[in-house]
Image (cartoon, rainbow, N blue to C red):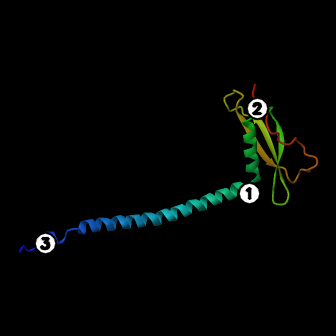
Amino acid sequence: MKIPSRQQRRRGYALLVVIMQVMLMTALWGVAFRQLSSAIRLIQSQNNFTQSTDPGLKALTRGLILLETGSPPDGYTCIVAIPGQNTPFYIQVKYSLDPSAGGQGTGWKVEVDDVTSSTDPKNLPYPAMPYTFPPPS
């Protein structure tokens, strides 16, 4: 009868140690991923809240989207009404050619200003924002 040597009795322990390390690393990765994903969700919700509550940002977004449809006349100003909780916000959007855009006449500066407190909704000082501008010639 053969007596088992010390090496033969310890077979399989290395595989068990490797499996335990893989399980431990997977568990640590899961904890780190969960914390990171919740932090990212929190930051995204804060950004969405800020963007959804700022009427000036909404008006600027509409103004830039409108600028993609064509070219307004230089110095064009219009009013856009952004719905609020109780009353709408009236935001003045002004377009002007940007001279720092290389002198090509293709760069635009878009400025927004909240004129809610100084604007009578029945007598707007500027026209309402159009749906499109004429295409560039």
Quadrant of residue 5 within the rendered picture: bottom left
Query: Residue placed at 74% from the left, 49% from the top?
Result: 58
The amino acid pointed to by label 1 is Thr
Q: N-terminal of the two: label 3 or label 1?
A: 3
| Of residues 125 and 131, the one drawn nearer to the viewer in this rendering | 131
The residue type indicated by label 2 comes to Ser
**x, y (%) of residue 100?**
68, 33
The nearer-to-camera label among 3 and 1 is 3
Label annotation for residue 53: 1
Q: Which residue position holds label 3?
A: 6
Give the mark nearer the N terminus: 2 vs 1: 1
Q: Does residue 60 sit above or below 117 in this rendering?
A: above
Mark positioned earlier in the residue sequence (2 or 3):
3
| Mark toward the viewer: 2 or 3 | 3
Q: Where is residue 33 in the image (x, y as percent from the top left)?
A: 48, 62
Measured in 3D between alpha carbons, the distance from the residue under mark 2 to the one under mark 1, in whole angstroms, is 29 Å
120 with respect to 35 (left or right): right
Element type at marker 3? Answer: helix
Read off the residue under disc 2. Answer: 71
Q: In which quarter of the view is residue 27 placed?
A: bottom left
Q: How crowded is mark 2: few (under 14 residues within 10 Å), some or many (20 or more)?
A: some
Residue 56 horizontal/vertical position (percent): 76, 50
Where 108 sits versus 113, above or below?
above
Secondary element type, mark 1: helix
Separation of residues labelled 2 and 3 (CA atoms):
86 Å
Category of crowding for the residue at label 1, using alpha-carbon neighbours closer than 10 angstroms: few (below 14), some (14–19), many (at least 20)? few
Instruction: Mark 2 and mark 3 in contact? Answer it, CB < 8 Å.
Output: no
Q: Which amino acid does label 3 sit on?
A: Arg
